Image (spheres, helix red, strand yellow):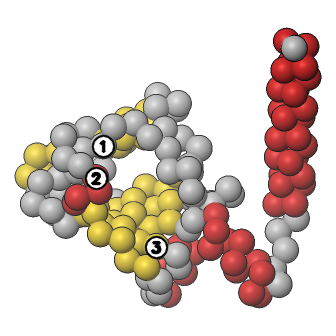
Amino acid sequence: MVSQASSVKNISRFDSTSFAEWRSKAVWSMDDKPVETSPHRDVLGFLHGISCLCPFGKFTGGAVILWELQVIVELNRGDLLYFMDHLINHSNEKAYGVRHSVVAFTENRVWTWLQRVYGFVDARVNPLRMAQKRYRKNRVERSETKRNRQI
């Protein structure tokens, strides 16, 4: 298995009109050995966003596994796979030959920046943030109550 960090290059401020939805980053693997990943979620992804994966090169194999969906997606060069990579555990099988890929995505912090700079308000975000704060507050209160009972 090839370390993903050693074979992937981050491109900050990737700005192309064809990738307008993913202005934050595009990542591509350019190593001679195809990257084989273990199951993971990209937890920095935008809460309501999707990522786009596009493999290219002369290769066989390298299918993408979407674990919760129990799906294996066979991709050919130039295919586009859109999915919510921050919600779905995913990995890829071993590829043979030369397989590179481009992954375009938006991190949540970029979405927050866009909202702040352009005054855009997504009505879905604030209720989710409030629910998250309530959950964290309740969790802290429960742990403090449990600690007090033990004393």
- Amino acid, disc 2: Gln
Asked if disc 2 and disc 1 are in contact, CB closer than 8 Å, the reply is yes
Residue 129 in percent (x, y) is at 83, 54
Q: Quadrant of residue 33?
A: bottom left
Q: Residue at x 19, y 47 (%)?
A: 2
151 over 46 or under it: above or below: above
Q: Residue at x 22, y 60 (%)?
A: 7
Q: Which residue is mark 1?
A: 37
- Amino acid, disc 1: Thr
Look at the numbered disc 3 and give the secondary structure of its residue. Answer: strand
Q: Which residue is mark 2?
A: 4
- Amino acid, disc 3: Lys
Q: Quadrant of residue 101?
A: bottom left
Estimate how packed mark 3 is, as few (under 14), some (14 to 19) or many (20 or more) residues with alpha carbons within 10 Å. Answer: some
Look at the image and tell me in which quarter the C terminus lies.
top right
Q: CA distance from mark 3 to mark 2?
A: 16 Å
N-term-proximal mark, 3 vs 1:
3
Whether residue 61 is visible to the viewer of this picture, yes or no, is no
Q: Nearer the viewer, mark 2 or mark 1?
A: 2
Q: Residue furthest front?
A: 151
Q: Which residue is mark 3?
A: 25
User: Quick one: 46 or 147, which is closer to the camera?
Assistant: 147
Q: CA distance from mark 3 to mark 1?
A: 19 Å
N-term-proximal mark, 3 vs 2:
2
Residue 105 in percent (x, y) is at 50, 66
Look at the numbered disc 2 and give the secondary structure of its residue. Answer: helix
Q: CA distance from mark 2 to mark 1?
A: 7 Å
Residue 79 in percent (x, y) is at 34, 60
Q: Is residue 79 left or right of residue 97?
A: right
User: Quick one: 78 or 43, which is closer to the camera?
Assistant: 43
